[in-house]
Image: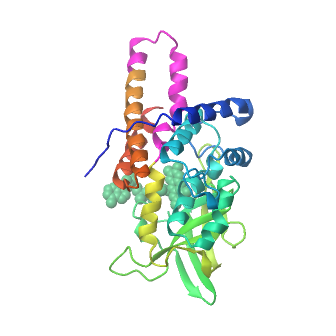
Amino acid sequence: MLRFDPTTLPESTAALRSQVREFLAAQGASLGVRNSDFTTGHDPEFSRKLGERGWIGMTWPSEYGGGERTFFDRYVVTEELLAAGVPVSAHWIADRQSGPLMLRFGTDEQKARYLPAITRGESYFSIGMSEPGSGSDLASVRTTAKREGDGWLVNGTKLWSTDAHRNHYMVALVRTEPPSENRHAGLSQVLVDLRNDGASIRPIRNIAGGEDFNEVVFEDVLLPLDRVVGEPGNGWQQVTSELAYERSGPERFLSAFRVLVEFVRAAGHDPNPAEAALIGRATSHLLALRRMSISVAGMLENGASPEVEAALVKALGNDFEKLLP
Ligand SMILES: Cc1cc2nc3c(=O)[nH]c(=O)nc-3n(C[C@H](O)[C@H](O)[C@H](O)COP(=O)(O)OP(=O)(O)OC[C@H]3O[C@@H](n4cnc5c(N)ncnc54)[C@H](O)[C@@H]3O)c2cc1C
């Protein structure tokens, strides 16, 4: 059953919001053109500054460099960074989903090895789910990892891997057992060192000439045994949990926020009726989506797993990001 309890951000978050705004104002023009789509600005120096402020891994345990703060605090920082349109893509996936995935399913050794560098804003992750022929139907992935001596031998191709040519690691969904009647069985997640394991990374040029996506090809790439995240065979449960983290934030409905800001600026203090109606329509959608997203943050804070609610906010957010331009 769908449930969005009305949730208000705690008063304590107001001071944090001011801190983020002051910090961003102090960065001045160094942050380039503002764009609220989190995938657009890969700026390791800025990610490191956010790490220093404690704004990466905010809810994680302190033993791994986390801030042990609430999901409301994390929501406020996320919202401010996206609304301001600053370059956050370098650390975003690691903070939002790869780190939480490892915290939940990884071994103690994996947590100790990978998480602190993420919270410092120094270690960046890509998502290795899609393949040629496997998109929405993710369980159809064909990349395999087979036990070979002291490791896992990986073969196959991942597609649309955002920033794999800039990031350090990829968490790849692979088949570790042959397909069976239960299509969700026999899948695992493996950690790939994108710079050192020998996978070939080929950028895909987009229509505007930019290179953000990649094809990542594995030809007999041998990974050490300890690169399986969690349990071999548990990949489906893990990947769905990872997708819940991906969907739980305000990324989609804020991605085109700067378009709305510029439109309001251009319409000025005395918008004509058509402009006023557009601003009203867009703003009311935005406020409804925001309340739903804060409700999801509240459910996460209470230890619930609002997977369907989070997916709904992402789907409606996708509609909104198309409506705005
Ligand atoms: C900006 C961006 C960044 C991305 N970054 C990454 C990344 O870093 N890593 C990664 O792994 N992937 C990434 N992707 C890939 C993305 O997750 C896939 O594109 C997505 O899973 C959809 O797969 P597909 O493109 O193959 O479309 P398809 O699965 O082929 O779907 C095509 C169309 O058919 C519809 N459709 C599919 N199945 C059904 C069905 N059963 N019933 C009804 N309709 C259906 C879909 O809704 C869609 O409209 C990225 C995509 C985008 C847009």
Residue farthest toward the left in the current orientation of the protein:
1
Residue farthest toward the top in the current orientation of the protein:
270
Which quadrant of the structure image shows residue 202? Answer: bottom right
Q: Nearer the viewer, residue 233 or 158?
A: 233
Magenta stretch encompasses residue 268: yes
Q: Nearer the viewer, residue 125 or 197?
A: 125
- The residues colored magenta run 249-277
Magenta stretch encompasses residue 207: no
The percent coordinates of residue 21 (x first, y second) are: 62, 31
Name above or below for residue 55 compared with residue 112.
above
Name above or below for residue 20 compared with residue 204.
above
Which quadrant of the structure image shows residue 225? Answer: bottom right
Name above or below for residue 5 compared with residue 29.
below
Q: Please state the total of marks drawn on the protein image.
A: 0
Which quadrant of the structure image shows residue 237? Answer: bottom left
Give the residue at x 59% y 56%.
94
Give the residue at x 53% y 29%.
259
Give the residue at x 47% y 60%.
242
Q: Is residue 9 left or right of residue 48?
A: left
Q: Is residue 249 left or right of residue 208?
A: left
Name above or below for residue 231 compared with residue 282.
below
The percent coordinates of residue 246 (x first, y second) are: 48, 53
The percent coordinates of residue 147 (x first, y second) are: 56, 86
The percent coordinates of residue 9 (x first, y second) are: 44, 37
